[in-house]
Image: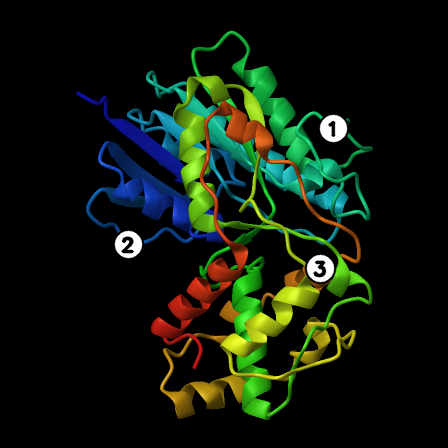
């Protein structure tokens, strides 16, 4: 008989958290509690709690009754304008969750932390590739590192364990998220088609030819649960990626072809500027094509897309540590994009 497990998914409305909730819900021996600022609609096996995680008192008040929690999956994130300003709120949210849950959840077994390649300095410029989990740290500030340091210290002498998952850019379809590359590409392509222009790669010179990898949100969900329940993975960090590498110069024409669009040579063009005046067009497209009425703000991850398309250097990590520890899942990146685009079309987000 399997022992029941109760997951607290923090950041349940994001690209990563929403896929994790869905994956856990499909597993037979998990109950799921989703935590987010906005909350959500309860369904069989999943209930939602609205919490302001920046507020220690609200966190304690809303979470202290969740004595049944066995696993905390932390995937919340607060955006700030500078790297230094990211540290305080993002560390505070994690601290508030652990401060609220650890004293009351006697059966707590694991705390899972979602990270990324910022640990390796990937956001700052060309970094050592492939990045490995034991690469030396870089000069702070870096909130991912501070969060992991907090967990390591907090866990000493405790019965529970921790893990840190380090995906590349995550592919998913959650809307209203500031970091959703697949949705940004889909909307950019749909608007290009509406205007009768080819799909140009808008990134920096050199980014078209750099070597990259991505991480499918569904794959990441499986890896996250694996790391939280596999004894060999306890108290460690793991790079989690699709398992293949690509260059935009090969993939971009294929993505354009999915939308029946021609391509033209790349043209450096910040989407945050180029798409700033497209809301009226988007509204008109939704009416003409009978779309679901998704607000333009909910599909506008232009700043993040510009960030990704600005990587004119190789961007990939070694994910063999997870394989050596027993996680063998993989996803083909090209097919991931097609599936996500199809999902967006079925949901009538794009024409």
**What's the CA distance linking mark 2 and mark 3?**
33 Å
Read off the residue under disc 3.
307
The x, y position of residue 37, in whole percent, is 45, 49
For the residues bearing labels 1 and 3, Cβ distance under 8 angstroms: no
Quadrant in which the C terminus is drawn: bottom left
**What's the CA distance linking mark 1 and mark 3?**
23 Å
Using the image as rendered, state which of residue 141 and residue 93 is in the foreground. 141
Q: Nearer the viewer, mark 1 or mark 3?
A: 1
Task: Check disc 2: other Cα within 10 Å, few if <14, some if 14-19, many if 20+.
Answer: few
SS under mark 1: loop
The x, y position of residue 178, in whole percent, is 57, 59
| Mark closer to the chain start, 1 or 2 | 2
Read off the residue under disc 2.
41
Q: Classify residue 87 as left or right of residue 114.
A: right
Q: Classify residue 166 as left or right of residue 266.
A: left
Q: Is residue 349 visible?
A: yes
- The structure residue drawn at horizontal position 72% and vertical position 38%, both measured from the top left corner, is 130
SS under mark 3: helix
Quadrant in which the N terminus is drawn: top left
- The structure residue drawn at horizontal position 45% and vertical position 45%, both measured from the top left corner, is 219
The mark tally for this picture is 3
Read off the residue under disc 1.
135
Question: Splitting the image into 4 quarters, where does residue 129 fall?
Answer: top right
Using the image as rendered, state which of residue 331 and residue 124 is in the foreground. 331
The x, y position of residue 186, in whole percent, is 53, 72
């Amino acid at each position: 008989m399997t022992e029941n497990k109760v997951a607290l998914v923090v950041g349940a409305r994001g690209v990563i958290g929403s896929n994790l909730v869905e994956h856990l819900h499909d597993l037979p021996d998990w109950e799921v509690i989703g935590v987010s600022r906005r909350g959500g609609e309860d369904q069989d096996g999943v209930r939602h709690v609205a919490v302001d995680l920046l507020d220690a008192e609200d966190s304690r008040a809303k979470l202290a009754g969740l004595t049944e929690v066995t696993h905390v999956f932390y995937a919340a994130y607060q955006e700030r304008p500078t790297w230094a300003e990211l540290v305080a709120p993002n560390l505070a949210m994690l601290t508030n969750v652990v401060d609220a849950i650890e004293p009351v959840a006697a059966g707590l077994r694991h705390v899972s932390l979602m990270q990324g390649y910022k640990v390796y300095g990937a956001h700052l410029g060309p970094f050592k590739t492939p990045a490995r989990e034991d690469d030396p740290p870089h000069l702070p500030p870096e909130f991912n590192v501070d969060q992991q340091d907090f967990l390591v210290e907090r866990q000493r002498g405790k019965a529970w364990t921790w893990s840190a998952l380090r995906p590349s850019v995550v592919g998913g379809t959650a809307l209203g998220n500031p970091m959703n590359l697949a949705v940004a590409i889909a909307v950019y392509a749909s608007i290009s088609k509406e205007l009768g222009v080819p799909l140009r790669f808008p990134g920096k010179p050199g980014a078209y030819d750099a070597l990259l990898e991505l991480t499918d949100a569904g794959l990441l969900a499986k890896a996250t649960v694996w790391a939280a329940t596999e004894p060999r993975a306890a108290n460690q960090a793991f790079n989690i990626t699709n398992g293949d590498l690509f260059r935009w110069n090969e993939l971009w024409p294929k993505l354009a072809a999915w939308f029946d669009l021609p391509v033209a040579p790349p043209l450096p063009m910040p989407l945050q500027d180029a798409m700033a005046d497209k809301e009226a067009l988007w509204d008109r497209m939704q009416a003409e094509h009978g779309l679901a009425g998704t607000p333009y703000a909910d599909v506008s991850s232009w700043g993040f897309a510009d960030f990704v398309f600005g990587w004119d250097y190789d961007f990939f990590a070694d994910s063999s540590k997870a394989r050596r520890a027993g996680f063998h899942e993989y996803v083909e990146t090209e097919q991931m994009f097609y599936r996500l685009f199809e999902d967006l079309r079925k949901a009538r987000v794009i024409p």
